[in-house]
Amino acid sequence: LWGAQASANSPGFELNDIGVLRKTDRYRVGGNVTYRENRPGKLFFRYNINARANVDWNFGGILTGQRYNLDSRFTFHNFWSSNVSVQYRPRSQSDVLTRGGPLAGRISSVQFNYGLNSNFGSPRFVRLNGSYQFDEAGGGRAEVNTTFRVTTSGRLEYSISPRYSRNLNRRQFIQTQL
């Protein structure tokens, strides 16, 4: 399987009268390739592996973002599933970090994600997700979250979803004035 996409948000596009648009002055080109195996094998009931790439520019032609992802999802014969992914973001320029001010450099980063899910149809369901991101400045982010769900009857369900997150941003914007 494969796909390709392109999108554009003109710098003159104004959506504030009816909603919120996080970014304008952008165009994006991207694509993906997926290998999917639906025939049960010795270890997996099914699985897929996906590679994606997206590149963003503003209408001035400045590279404002790149993302390269490798994702996978595996379903075991007992219908537990697992997903693993990695994302690489090379250096680029940003006019969002300074809220429309001068361009700022966006440093490169790498992010890893992992998830494990028990059988969703079971009366007792457990989900565990984790992510770890680091950047070239020594900053990073780590997060672990889980969900525990118990269904006692066809109409009553209890669940709890604790989460732990830690974020370290070593980059600061300092402007000197004369």
Image (tube, grey):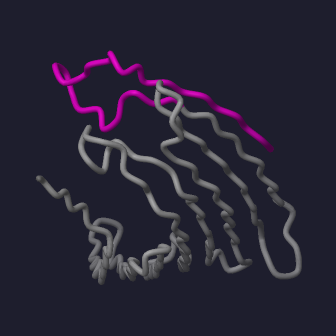
Give the number of marks: 0
Identified at 77% across, 52% down, the residue is 34
Q: Is residue 142 left or right of residue 8?
A: left
Residue ranking furthest to the front: 178
Residue 167 picture location, percent across and down: 31, 77
Q: Which residues are magenta?
A: 1-27
Lateral position of residue 99 relative to residue 115, left or right: left
Name the residue located 56 percent from the left edge and 59 percent from the top edge. Answer: 89
Can residue 146 be seen?
Answer: no
Q: Please say whether residue 121 is visible from this viewpoint.
A: yes
Q: Main secondary structure of the magenta part?
A: loop
Q: Nearer the viewer, residue 83 or 149?
A: 83
As drawn, is 37 to the left or to the right of 175?
right
Residue placed furthest toward the left = 178
Q: Position of residue 25 (x, y in %)?
A: 40, 27
Q: Position of residue 156 (x, y in %)?
A: 27, 71
Residue 98 higher or lower than 129, as above or below: above
Depth check: give the residue in front, 80 or 140.
140
Compared with residue 27, is residue 114 higher up or lower down, i.e. above or below? below
x, y (%) of residue 128? 46, 81
Q: Quadrant of the N terminus?
A: top right
Q: Nearer the viewer, residue 152 or 108?
A: 108
Left or right: where does residue 45 sit relative to residue 53? right
Residue at 54% from the left image edge and 80% from the top image edge: 118
Is residue 20 located in the magenta-colored stretch of the structure? yes
Residue lying at 36% horizontally and 78% vertically, measured from the top left: 149
What is the quadrant of residue 2 in the picture?
A: top right
* The furthest residue to the top: 12
